[in-house]
Amino acid sequence: MTSGDATQDVETPRAKAATRRGRSAYLYTLISLAGLFIVWQLVVSAQWVTEFFLPGPARVFSLMVEMVVDGTLFVHIVVSLGRVIAGFLLAVLVALPLGMLIGLWRPMFHLVDPWIELVRPIPPIAWIPLAIMWLGLGEESKVAIIMYGAFFPIVLNTVSGFRGVERVHIWAALTLGVSRQQIFWHVIMRSALPRVVVGLRLGAGMAFIVLVAAELILADAGLGFLIQDGRYQLKTEQIMVGIVVIGVIGYFINKGLLWLESKWIPYRETLDQNT
Amino acid sequence: MSEKVHITDLNMIYVSDRLERSVTALEDIDLSIATGEFVCLLGPSGCGKTTLLNLIAGFLQPTSGSVLVNGTPVSAPGPDRGVVFQEYGIFPWFTVSQNIAFGPRMRGASKREQEDIVRHYVDLVHLTGFEHHYPGELSGGMKQRVSIARSLANGPDILLMDEPFGALDAMTRETMQEELLRIWELDKKTCVFVTHSIAEAVYLADRIVILSAHPGRVKDIVEVDLERLRDRSSGEYFELYRHVDVTLRVEMSKSREEYEEA
């Protein structure tokens, strides 16, 4: 079933208005960002603060260009993203099936939920000493810390997705003569999917946020390392490069995942209504 | 006319864990519904009319007594009994077309068959142009059209409807009642329709089964011998309305007295 002509006819004016709104939103974003950089540079140029405490955007940008040219920034990014992806995927591997089990089976909920709620408030940094003792100073401990951070948003949203499957949808399917197996795939899974995808997006975001904490553990490359190393060498602009790059990458990861979400769940905007 | 649904000596008792007592929802129900008949189950809230519908649908099992459909005891929900729920029950992750085609698709109908079914039922419930909309983009009345189309597209023998128009505004509600009758007149499927609206029951039903509350019993059965489509402002219509209204009122005050004595 391809998208219908009628649908497009109905939505064309609305789509046009949305495009107009989108364009002006884009403009505001640009003004806002440019304004920040101008103020930042002014503060430094006027020498209200010394460049040791706050290097100006020009200086940070020139170091960034330098690091791009000599390839070191690329290496740091690749190393960090590798850790984030490994930690995220491991978290998905555990959190998805576990969340599904908890969401669909009450005894499992009562068994596991207290533990999740108990451990969840413990920040990833608190685990660093134990992670080092148990897993050493290599990649394992760093990936484990990232996995820990990503785990909770995924498992919690998966649980609520599967617990939120409505009885009326199962009953409706039963009266249509649909088999149990088909109900699982076409009703239960479909019903839980939007929340699961939200969990994946938040989990990916969390994996990236936890990255710097994970790279506090002895590292010789990575964006977190860049920041740590900048601190030891008193190179403030290197710290700033690390911070800016993390911000920019995080921004694009989130944008990309939101885009994927809208592709996977085209009806997302129509939810949260009584259907 | 042959018999479609036969209910004998039916009792339904719920055990409430929270209240630590059992509640009798339905008591000594005997009811026979003929093939092609349009029956309304009418009663105040808490009279067990939805429970009775759910027992026919097979979502619930009676504490005692039996429900026969086509002479066979009901043990589970099945495609012979289509259900239209008050809260719509259509799938928000499917478009209108996908909702309507869902039953046939799961049975393994070909793409061609599915398209034909969708075209026919979209046309029947007047949703042409909305085939590719998601339920969240539709009004309440349109959602209920989808729900009716989805049930009919699966070819049920009986249509069970649980206050399907309860959530709609008065104007939409009357339109939907007229639409439902127009569709029903085409092949006169056996229809069991739960409502708490007297006007709706008098407008739609061949027979109105009036249930009393706490516990739910069959209080009275009223035959509606008026030509369809019925004139909502005619004298006969109003006479029947009054008759049913009086019966219900007596019933409600009685159950209130009993409740207060208890």
Image (tube, helix red, strand yellow):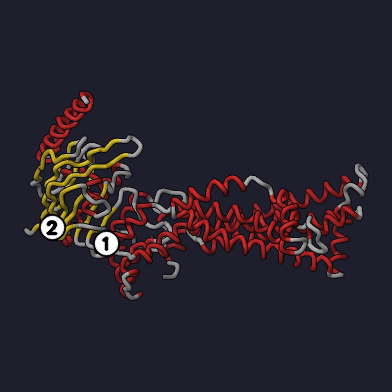
Identify residue type, mark 2: Lys
The front one of A207 and A198 is A207
The front one of A177 and B167 is A177
Please indicate whether residue A4 sits to the left or right of residue A131 in the image: left
* Residue at (18% x, 44% y) in the render: B11
The quadrant of the picture occupied by the N terminus of chain A is bottom left
Between disc 2 and disc 1, whose residue precedes? 2
* Residue at (33% x, 60% y) in the render: A173
Mark 2, chain letter? B
The picture places residue B174, in percent across and down from the top left corner, at 25, 46
Residue occupied by mark 1: B124
- Which of discs 2 and 1 lies nearer the camera? The answer is 2
* Residue at (35% x, 52% y) in the render: A168
Asked whether disc 2 touches disc 1, contact meaning CB atoms under 8 Å apart, the reply is no
Q: Secondary structure at mark 1?
A: helix
The front one of A239 and B135 is A239
Q: Is residue B210 visible?
A: no
What's the mark number on residue B49? none
What's the mark number on residue B4? 2
The front one of A36 and B60 is B60
Mark 1, chain letter? B
Identify residue type, mark 1: Leu
